[in-house]
C-alpha cells in the first residue's frame, strides 16, 4: 500500500515527557565546535549569523561563533519557540524570538523550586535580553526583531552560562546541564531538551525555510526522579503541580448553613455514582497575568475553575477537587460536565503562547482525559469560544477565548490526538465530493488571515500583527474571495456579515471542525454553517481540509429542527424530586434546516440537570443529578458545539472515506502482471477491502486478487481495479482506479 503523507512534525507527546533529573545525561562530544569563547562583553562575533540566509544557516553560524554545539542550540530553542522568530512580537511571558529571550529580570526564586534550579547559580537580576546584548554588542531591539541576531544572542547567553559554571564550550555535552537549565524557569526544561535531542525534530519555520535536528539515539535518556508536585493536586506526578484551593465559603460567616449565598463553586460527586459526569475539558485564557488570576480564584465572592497555568514556565496550580463543579464556562450544563483550564495570556494577542505552557497543558489534558474518560477530540477538548449560549440572545455574549492565535494543530498533536488524524492536507490533495465529511486542518504557522482590533477586543493584547498565524479558515457567503464573510445569527442577531475583528467568530472555522460538503465549485467547498450554505476556499496548492468520517444528521420530516445550548432532561424526569423545579428546555438562535446535513460530534451526550443551590446541600433534593430519557445529538454547528433532539433528526451511519483511492501498477502488455494498490481508507484500523478487476469497466470473472495476469483476451482493453471497502458501523463504499491504456501485444 502506498504511503500517504502525514504531518511529520515530531513532538514530545504528552505522557512521554521525561521527569526532572538531577543531571540530564547529555552525550560527550555530540557535535561540539571549537569556536571562540563568549564571556567578555561584546565578545561574540555575530557577523555570520546576521548574514545567514535561513534559520538553519543561522544555527550553524552561531555554533561556530560561540562553540555551543548546533544540535544543542536547536534543541534548546525548539523548547523555547519551535524555531520561530514571531516577527519580533513577544510571547505571553514577555520573551522575544527564537530563544524567547525575556526583556525583564526573572522573579526571585519562590522557595518551591520554580525560580531556579537548586544548587545552580542564580539567574541574576539582569534580563536575558540585556545580558545577551552585552555579550554580542547587538542592540536589544535588533535581537528582538532579527532572527539571526536572536539565534546568535541565545547561543552567546548559553555559552556564558556554561562559563559561569566554570566550564568551556568545548566541554562534553553531559556537562551542559547547568547552562541549559538556566535558559528557562521550567523545572523540567533540561530533561525536555534531552528528549528533543533523542527524538529529533524537523519543521518549516516562519522564514520559509526548514530546520532539521537529527535524532540522537546516542544521547542517554534522563534518569527518573521522585515527583516534586503537591500530592493533593490532581496532576501527572512529574508536572510539579501546586495545590492552591479555591474557597468554598458563605458570603458571610453569619449566614445560616443552608444559605444560597456562597461561592465560588459547587460541591458534587462527579467522580462517583452521584454525578454529573466529566465529559469535556475547556481551554480558556486568563486575560490578565498569572498572579492576579490566582488571587481571583481564591476570592470566595468570585468564581472558580480547575487549573491555572503560568506562561513563563508552564507551572500548574490546581484549585478544585475533580468531583466539584467550577463556574467557568458561562453555561451550567457545560460547567456540570467540564474541567476548566485557564492559561495565562490574552485572546487577542498575536504574540505567542509559550511552548512551556503548551507542553504542560497538553500533558495535563492527556492525563485528565485518560483518567476521566474524556474523548480526545476537538468536540470534547474545546475552547471557551465553542461553548454555546443557554437561551436566545445569550450566544452573542459568550466568551471567545482562547482566541484566533491559540495553535490548536500543535496543541492537539502534543495531547496525542492530532487534528485530522495527522493527515497532511497537502499530502492527500484537495479533492472532495458532495456528501463527504471533511475536517479542517489550518496549518497554523502558514495560515495568516487578517485580524483587527486586537487591543480593543482584548485589552492587554497589543496591536494585531499582519502575517501572524491563525487557527481558522474563513467561510464566505459565495464561492469567491470577494464575497462577504459568513453570518452567524447567534453571534450577530441583527444579521450582519462577519468581520475581521478579533472577537468576531461569525465566519471562523477552526482547526478540528468537521463539516459535510454540500457542493463543490472549483476550489470552493460549499458546507452547512449556522443554518446557511457557506463556502471555504480549498485550493489544490494549499488545501485546508482532509478526508474524515463521522455520523451525520438530517431533519426527520419537513420542518426545521430546533438547536439547544444544553441537553436538559424532559419535565417528567423531575417528578421524583419535588424540591427541584423543572428546567425549561428552550431552543437558542439556530435551527437545522430541512435540506441541511451536520456532523455529529457525540451521538449520546448525557441528558441531565445537576441541582445545587444551598451551601450545605440541605435544600430539598439539593445536590441531585436529575437524569432524563430524552435523547440529544451533539453537533458541529457554526463555531460551537450544540445539541439537537434525537426525536427531530435522522441519524446516518458514517460512510467509509478514501484518503487515497486504488490504482493499477505495471505495464499494460500481454504476458505481464498488473498489481493493485488498494489505497487507504477511513476508518483505517477496521476497514476490509475486497478487490475486483475490470476489463473495459466490466468485472472479469474470478479476478479478485491483488495481481492480474494479462492474456490475449485483454488485447486492446483498458484494465482497472475496483475496491469495495467495509468497516463495522460504517456504510460500505466502492472506489475504482483510473484505467490503464489499451493493453498492447507482447
Image (cartoon, rainbow, N blue to C red):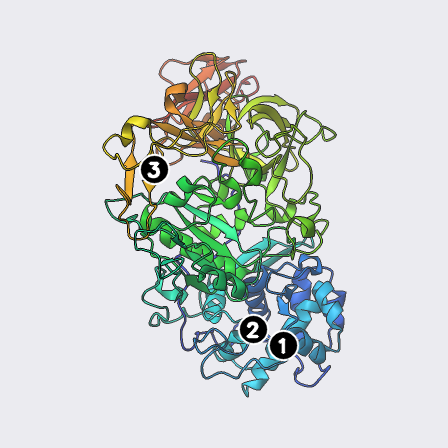
Q: What is the CA distance from the residue labelled 1 to the residue labelled 3? A: 56 Å
Which residue is labeled 2 in the image? 183
Residue drawn at (37%, 43%), measured in percent from left and top? 279
Which residue is labeled 3 in the image? 609
Which residue is labeled 1 in the image? 157
Is residue 602 found left or right of 294 in the rendered image?
A: left
Q: Please tell me in which quadrant of the rendered image residue 262 appears.
A: bottom left
Q: Which of 720 and 213 lies nearest the eye of the viewer?
A: 213
* Helix, strand or loop at mark 2: loop
* Helix, strand or loop at mark 1: helix
Marked residue nearer the N-terminal end (1 or 2) = 1
Residue drawn at (53%, 74%), measured in percent from left and top? 180
Is residue 360 found left or right of 470 in the rendered image?
A: left
Q: In this rendering, is residue 52 above or below 408?
A: below
* Helix, strand or loop at mark 3: strand
Q: In this rendering, is residue 269 above or below 193?
A: above
Q: What is the CA distance from the residue labelled 3 to the residue labelled 2? A: 49 Å
Label 3 crowd (10 A; few <14 / some 14-19 / many >=20)? many
**Is disc 1 in contact with disc 2, using a CB cutoff of under 8 Å?**
yes
Q: In this rendering, is residue 195 above or below 260?
A: below
Q: Which of 576 and 111 lies nearest the eye of the viewer?
A: 576
Task: Please state the horizontal and vertical placement of residue 722, each as a whole percent of the image.
Answer: 45, 20
Task: Please state the horizontal and vertical placement of residue 538, each as a whole percent of the image.
Answer: 63, 32
Task: Please state the horizontal and vertical placement of residue 102, each as a whole percent of the image.
Answer: 63, 70
Asked whether the viewer can see residue 214, the reply is no
Label 1 crowd (10 A; few <14 / some 14-19 / many >=20)? many
Amino acid at each position: 500500500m502506498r504511503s500517504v503523507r502525514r504531518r511529520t512534525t515530531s513532538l514530545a507527546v504528552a505522557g512521554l515527557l521525561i521527569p526532572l533529573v538531577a543531571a540530564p545525561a547529555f552525550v560527550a562530544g555530540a557535535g561540539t565546535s571549537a569556536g571562540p569563547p563568549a564571556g567578555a562583553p561584546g565578545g561574540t562575533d555575530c557577523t555570520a549569523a546576521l548574514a545567514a540566509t535561513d534559520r538553519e544557516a543561522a544555527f550553524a553560524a552561531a555554533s561556530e561563533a560561540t562553540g555551543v554545539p548546533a544540535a544543542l542550540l536547536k534543541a534548546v530553542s525548539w523548547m523555547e519557540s519551535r524555531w520561530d522568530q514571531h516577527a519580533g512580537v513577544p510571547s505571553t511571558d514577555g520573551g522575544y524570538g527564537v530563544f524567547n529571550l525575556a526583556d525583564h529580570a526573572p522573579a526571585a526564586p519562590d522557595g518551591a523550586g520554580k525560580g531556579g534550579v537548586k544548587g545552580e547559580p542564580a539567574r541574576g537580576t539582569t534580563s536575558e535580553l540585556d545580558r545577551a546584548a552585552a555579550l554580542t554588542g547587538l542592540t536589544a531591539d535588533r535581537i528582538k526583531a532579527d532572527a539571526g541576531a536572536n539565534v546568535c544572542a541565545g547561543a552567546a547567553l548559553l555559552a556564558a552560562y556554561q562559563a559561569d559554571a566554570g566550564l568551556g564550550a568545548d566541554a562534553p555535552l553531559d556537562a551542559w546541564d547547568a547552562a541549559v537549565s538556566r535558559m528557562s524557569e521550567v523545572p523540567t526544561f533540561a530533561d525536555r531538551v534531552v528528549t528533543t535531542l533523542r527524538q529529533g525534530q524537523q519543521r518549516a519555520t516562519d522564514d520559509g525555510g526548514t530546520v532539521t535536528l537529527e535524532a540522537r539515539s546516542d544521547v542517554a535518556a534522563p534518569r527518573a526522579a521522585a515527583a516534586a508536585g503537591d500530592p493533593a493536586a490532581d496532576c501527572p506526578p512529574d508536572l510539579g503541580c501546586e495545590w492552591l484551593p479555591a474557597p468554598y465559603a458563605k458570603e458571610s460567616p453569619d449566614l445560616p448553613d443552608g444559605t444560597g449565598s456562597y461561592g465560588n463553586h459547587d460541591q458534587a460527586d462527579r467522580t462517583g455514582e452521584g454525578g454529573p459526569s466529566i465529559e469535556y475539558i475547556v481551554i480558556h485564557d486568563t486575560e490578565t497575568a498569572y498572579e492576579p488570576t490566582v488571587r481571583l480564584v481564591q476570592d470566595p465572592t468570585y468564581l472558580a475553575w480547575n487549573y491555572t497555568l503560568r506562561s513563563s514556565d508552564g507551572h500548574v496550580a490546581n484549585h478544585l477537587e475533580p468531583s466539584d463543579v467550577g463556574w467557568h464556562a458561562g453555561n451550567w450544563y457545560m460547567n456540570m460536565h467540564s474541567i476548566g483550564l485557564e492559561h495565562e495570556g490574552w485572546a487577542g494577542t498575536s504574540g505567542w503562547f509559550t511552548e512551556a505552557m503548551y507542553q504542560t497543558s497538553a500533558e495535563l489534558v492527556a492525563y485528565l482525559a485518560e483518567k476521566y474518560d474524556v474523548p480526545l477530540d476537538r468536540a470534547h477538548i474545546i475552547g471557551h469560544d465553542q461553548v454555546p449560549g443557554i437561551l436566545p440572545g445569550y450566544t452573542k455574549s459568550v466568551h471567545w477565548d482562547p482566541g484566533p492565535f491559540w495553535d490548536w494543530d500543535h496543541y492537539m498533536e502534543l495531547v496525542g490526538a492530532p487534528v485530522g488524524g495527522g493527515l497532511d492536507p497537502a499530502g492527500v490533495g484537495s479533492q472532495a465530493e458532495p456528501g463527504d465529511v471533511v475536517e479542517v486542518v489550518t496549518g497554523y504557522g502558514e495560515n495568516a488571515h487578517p485580524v483587527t482590533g486586537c487591543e480593543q477586543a482584548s485589552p492587554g493584547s497589543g496591536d494585531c500583527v499582519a502575517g501572524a498565524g491563525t487557527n481558522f479558515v474563513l467561510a464566505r457567503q459565495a464561492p469567491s474571495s470577494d464575497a462577504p464573510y459568513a453570518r452567524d445569527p447567534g453571534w450577530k442577531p441583527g444579521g450582519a456579515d462577519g468581520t475581521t475583528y478579533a472577537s468576531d467568530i461569525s465566519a471562523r472555522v477552526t482547526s478540528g471542525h468537521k463539516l459535510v460538503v454540500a457542493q463543490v465549485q472549483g476550489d470552493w467547498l460549499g458546507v452547512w454553517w449556522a443554518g446557511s450554505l457557506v463556502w471555504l476556499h480549498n485550493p489544490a496548492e494549499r488545501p485546508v481540509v482532509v478526508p474524515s468520517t463521522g455520523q451525520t444528521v438530517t431533519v426527520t420530516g419537513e420542518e426545521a429542527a430546533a438547536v439547544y445550548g444544553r441537553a436538559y432532561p424532559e419535565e417528567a424526569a423531575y417528578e421524583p424530586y419535588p424540591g427541584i423545579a423543572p428546567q425549561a428546555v428552550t431552543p437558542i438562535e439556530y435551527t437545522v434546516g430541512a435540506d441541511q446535513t451536520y456532523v455529529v460530534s457525540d451521538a449520546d451526550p448525557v441528558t441531565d440537570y445537576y441541582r445545587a443551590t444551598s451551601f450545605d446541600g440541605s435544600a430539598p433534593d439539593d445536590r441531585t443529578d436529575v437524569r432524563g430519557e430524552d435523547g440529544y445529538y451533539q453537533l458541529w454547528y457554526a463555531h460551537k458545539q450544540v445539541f439537537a433532539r434525537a426525536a427531530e433528526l435522522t441519524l446516518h451511519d458514517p460512510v467509509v472515506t478514501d484518503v487515497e483511492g486504488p490504482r493499477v501498477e505495471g505495464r499494460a502488455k500481454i504476458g505481464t502482471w498488473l498489481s493493485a494498490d488498494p489505497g487507504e481508507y477511513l476508518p483505517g484500523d477496521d476497514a476490509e477491502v475486497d478487490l475486483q478487476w475490470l476489463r473495459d469497466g466490466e468485472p472479469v470473472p474470478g479476478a479478485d486478487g491483488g495481481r492480474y495476469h494479462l492474456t490475449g483476451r485483454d488485447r486492446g482493453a483498458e484494465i482497472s481495479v475496483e475496491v469495495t471497502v467495509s468497516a463495522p458501523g460504517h456504510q460500505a463504499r466502492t472506489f475504482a482506479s483510473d484505467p490503464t491504456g489499451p493493453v498492447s501485444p507482447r
